[in-house]
Amino acid sequence: MPSLHDRINEWLAPKLDELDAYLVEVRHNPASRRIEVYLDRDAPDKGIDLDACEAVSRFLETYLDHAEGVPRDYILEVSSPGMGNPFKTLRQYRKYIGREVDVVLLDGRKLQGILADASETGIELDAYVGAPSKAKAKAGADAPAPETERHSLPFDRIKSTKRSLPF
């Protein structure tokens, strides 16, 4: 039998197409009966709203209520992946091309910069040299652009990548 993640992905495909959204992650904890479904949209300025979460939840419940291996008293949560959570899919990386991100490498190094590109194998990051961009933001809009250095980072060297938050 396919995994719950695979079944949810299959069930949701038409609904997500209708909503112009995609599946980021499914978390299932059998001990707590909790099923968490995280969705996103490709447009950087258009995230997942409450109406989309509600529509997906109602749609998915019609499958979960009759699915083998799903407890009768499951708890379903549908939401966006959240601004501070690491990227899980290539589509999330592509969504933030041209935007500021924070990258933590497996060796512990932390880089901040502008995501220049994302492919099946890794990312191109224009990492800030010296002070991070938050210092630039405090200096004001007239401050000179910070110096950057291009890094080619394969996914197997990246521990996490998050959208850089301005606070």
Image: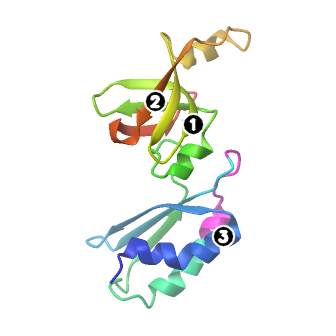
Question: Which residue in the rendered view is the most extreme toward the right?
Answer: 142
Report x, y in % for residue 37. Answer: 48, 65
Q: Nearer the viewer, mark 1 or mark 3?
A: 1
Residue at disc 2, secondary structure: strand
Establish if 23 lies above or below 113.
below
Q: Position of residue 138 (x, y in %)?
A: 62, 14
- Kind of residue indicated by mark 1: Asp
Q: Quadrant of the N terminus?
A: bottom left
* In this view, the mark in front (3 or 2): 2
For image coordinates 64% across by 33% down, the residue present is 98
Whichever of labels 1 and 3 marks the residue nearer the N terminus, that label is 3
Residue 100, placed above or below residue 20: above
Q: Which residue is mark 3?
A: 17
Q: CA–CA distance between discs 3 and 2?
A: 32 Å
Q: Which residue is identified by label 1?
A: 117
Question: Label 2 belongs to which residue?
Answer: 152
| Residue 45 drawn in magenta | yes
Three-letter code for the amino acid on which mark 3 is drawn? Asp
Residue appearing at x 46%, y 45% in the figure: 85
Task: Please give the name of the residue rendered at 50% of the width and 11% of the height, measured from the top-left corner.
Answer: 131
Instruction: Give SS at disc 1.
Output: strand
Residue at horizontal 55%, vertical 16%?
A: 148
- Give the CA separation, mark 2 to mark 1: 9 Å
Residue 62: image x %, image y %?
Answer: 53, 86
Numbered mark located on residue 27 in the image:
none
Q: Is residue 136 above or below residue 161?
A: above
Q: Residues within 10 Å of mark 1 (few under 14, many from 20)?
A: some
User: Where residue 77 appears, x then y in whole percent?
Assistant: 48, 67
The residue range painted magenta reads 44-55
Q: Is residue 16 above or below residue 101?
A: below
